[in-house]
Amino acid sequence: TLSNQTLTINGKSFTLDADPKMPILWALRDILGLTGTKYGCGAGLCGACTVHLDGQPVRACLTSLGQAQGKQLTTIEGLDNQKLKNAWAEHNVPQCGYCQAGQLMSAAALVAQHPKPSEEQINSAMSGNLCRCGTYPRIKAALQNYAK
Ligand code: FES
């Protein structure tokens, strides 16, 4: 059943008439036009849809509107870590780019918690984000450079 779902996304409040079980990925992309968050597998396996819920990385394809009620949702459009974006640009991280919003959101959550992440922390935080182009070494280099 449809009901009013109020979401705070990138600091702004939105009210949608939608099913609380709807994955936030669909609300973001199809209703709100925030298409920076990507649909990869739809099953929690690839990380392309990673967003932050109260600062924690979550999969937008597995998180429902109901679960996001009353929490702060941040998408790639609202990611304000310019230093991290610069590190990505300096290392020319993206190839096709499809997975990169999710990669950046996972990386941003990591450095928010560990500003100087160890290699182990990088590997563990980024292991759920797949990249068909194999940009993993550049992702790691960008994160190591960020930590300097
Ligand atoms: Fe959500 Fe792949 S689209 S994890």
Image (cartoon, helix red, strand yellow):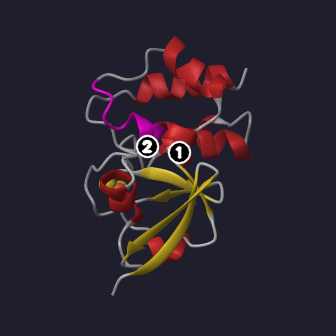
**Residue 38 percent across, percent down from the top left:** 33, 45
- On screen, residue 58 versus residue 86, left or right, reads left
Magenta stretch containing residue 98, yes or no?
yes
Q: Amino acid at mark 2?
A: Gly
Q: Are marks 1 and 2 in contact (CB under 8 Å)?
A: yes
What residue is rendered at 45% in x and 71% in y? 65
Query: Is residue 123 in view?
Result: no
Q: Which mark is residue 106?
A: 1
- On screen, residue 89 versus residue 81, left or right, reads left
In-front residue for pair 10/144: 10
Ligand 1, by image quadrant, is: bottom left
**Residue 80 percent across, percent down from the top left:** 64, 34
Whether disc 2's CB lies below 8 Å from ligand 1 is answered yes
Read off the magenta span.
Answer: 96-103
Whether disc 1's CB lies below 8 Å from ligand 1 is answered no
Disc 2: which residue = 102
C-alpha span from label 1 to label 2: 6 Å
Crowd around label 2: few <14 · some 14–19 · many ≥20 (10 Å): many
In-front residue for pair 56/4: 4
Magenta stretch containing residue 34, yes or no?
no
* Quadrant the C terminus occupies: top right
